[in-house]
Image (tube, rainbow, N blue to C red):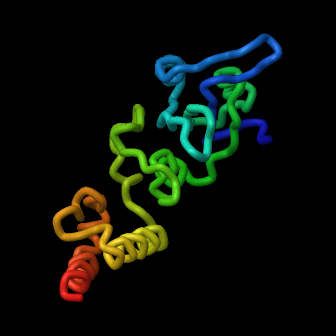
Amino acid sequence: MAKSMKTAFIRVASENNTQNGLVRYIKSDIDTILREWSASCKLTYWFIEHSADEEVSLTHWHIVLRFANPTPFENIKSKFPYGDIENAKSIKSCVQYLIHLNDKSKVQYKWEDIVTNCEDMTPFKVQSNAQGEITIQRIMEQIEKGEIREFNQFEYIPIEIWAKYKTRIENGVTFYRER
């Protein structure tokens, strides 16, 4: 592991079996740690709670950190001693992963579910061309199967995708209707 980190991606479980017994975290614990820490250093954070589901048996949190200056790994580990900590190679990809924007096979969360001290989330909401193409292909398959129709398209298609691929989506809906 790196001696110091400028970015970090952390996963913390709600229940952690330790030598000292069971350690539990709730959302307010994570929020307090991050707010207090960011008040004492230049730190931008994003975090989200992922509920237990078919894939994961415990509720857990994903946390993305961006430091103004490299921070010793030990400092990060002291804040989240039971977390899995790794270097965040791409802050944008990590923030997008919080809502599973870049993995449509997983439970989809909303941007509003992210707790952050970042003032402008706009840059994170834009998918790369490759990610956008994968998303539009999945949407087109859903249109072809009749899962997405004219009357419900706005429930399933995020505005960013609809605006960028409007013509393709409308053509797909027209194709389904005329077929």
Residue 48, x across and y down, in percent = 47, 36
Q: How many marks?
A: 0
Residue 117 visible here? yes
Residue 155, x across and y down, in percent = 25, 56
Location of residue 112 by image quarter? top left
Residue 89 is left or right of residue 119, and the answer is right
Location of residue 177 by image quarter? bottom left
What residue is drawn where x is 71% and y is 26%? 82
Q: Nearer the viewer, residue 51 or 176?
A: 176
Location of residue 69 by image quarter? top right
Residue 83, x across and y down, in percent = 68, 30
Residue 63 is left or right of residue 76, and the answer is left
Q: Nearer the viewer, residue 129 or 82?
A: 82
Residue 132, x across and y down, in percent = 41, 69
Q: Nearer the viewer, residue 124 or 161?
A: 161
The single residue placed furthest to the top in the displayed view is: 20
What residue is drawn where x is 60% and y is 25%? 14
What residue is drawn where x is 66% and y is 32%? 71
Location of the N terminus (image quadrant):
top right
**Residue 113 position (above or below residue 141):** above
Residue 54 is left or right of residue 85, and the answer is left
Q: Nearer the viewer, residue 164 or 22?
A: 22
The single residue placed furthest to the bottom in the displayed view is: 179
Location of the C terminus (image quadrant):
bottom left
Residue 65 visible here? no
